[in-house]
Image (cartoon, helix red, strand yellow):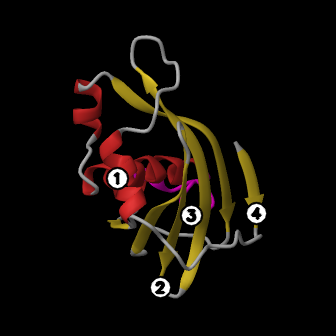
Amino acid sequence: MKTVYKQEMPMPESRPLIVTLPITPKTYDIDFAAIVHNMVYIRWLEDLRTELLAANGYSIEQMLADGFTPILTKTEIAYQWPVRFGDEVTGRMWLSHLGRTKWTVQAEMVTGEHTAVTSTQHGYFADMKTLRPIRVPPQFRALWENW
């Protein structure tokens, strides 16, 4: 995982299939510096990816029942503003690229008027038995093409 501090990743204006999720930092998310620990954002990105799939009609549960899963291959994250206990955080994630088998999502987490985190994640869909890449599920492909 590549970690970048105080450097903003450019976020596009076009945000296909975007989802928004309110996030409440918990006491166990806070580190010794009294801010949200950097690894907590990775968990929040997982929550956003799960919501992105479900909100667009293809939940993880359904995907697993169909015999395949999304696999994450790379996470880039830029920490730009500290989040503290009690802050209200809004997470947003959208699909920024969809290839034959690979996908890219981008995300941001904001608190008040500050962007706390920006992130880009890459992955693919895989057969559960072999973990080999498969084509993007047709229903997800249709959403992307009709966006």
Cα distance in 3D space between marks 4 and 2: 20 Å
Considering only vertical position in the picture, is 129 above or below 117? above
Q: Is residue 16 left or right of residue 100?
A: left
- The three-letter amino acid code for the residue at tag 2 is Gly
The image's mark for residue 124 is none
Cα distance in 3D space between marks 3 and 4: 15 Å
Label 2 Cα neighbours within 10 Å, binned few <14 / some 14-19 / many ≥20: few
Q: Nearer the viewer, residue 62 or 23?
A: 62
Q: Nearer the viewer, mark 3 or mark 4?
A: 4
Cα distance in 3D space between marks 2 and 3: 15 Å
Residue 108 in view of the camera: yes
- Give the labeled residue for mark 3: 35
Label 4 Cα neighbours within 10 Å, binned few <14 / some 14-19 / many ≥20: few
- Circle 1 sits in a helix, a strand or a loop, which is it? helix
Closer to the N terminus: mark 4 or mark 1?
4
Whole-percent x, y for residue 45 in the image: 47, 52
Closer to the N terminus: mark 3 or mark 4?
4
Residue at x 48% of width, y 71% of height:
15
Cβ atoms at labels 3 and 4 below 8 Å apart: no
The image's mark for residue 112 is 2
Q: Is residue 17 left or right of residue 83?
A: left
Q: Quadrant of the N terminus?
A: top right
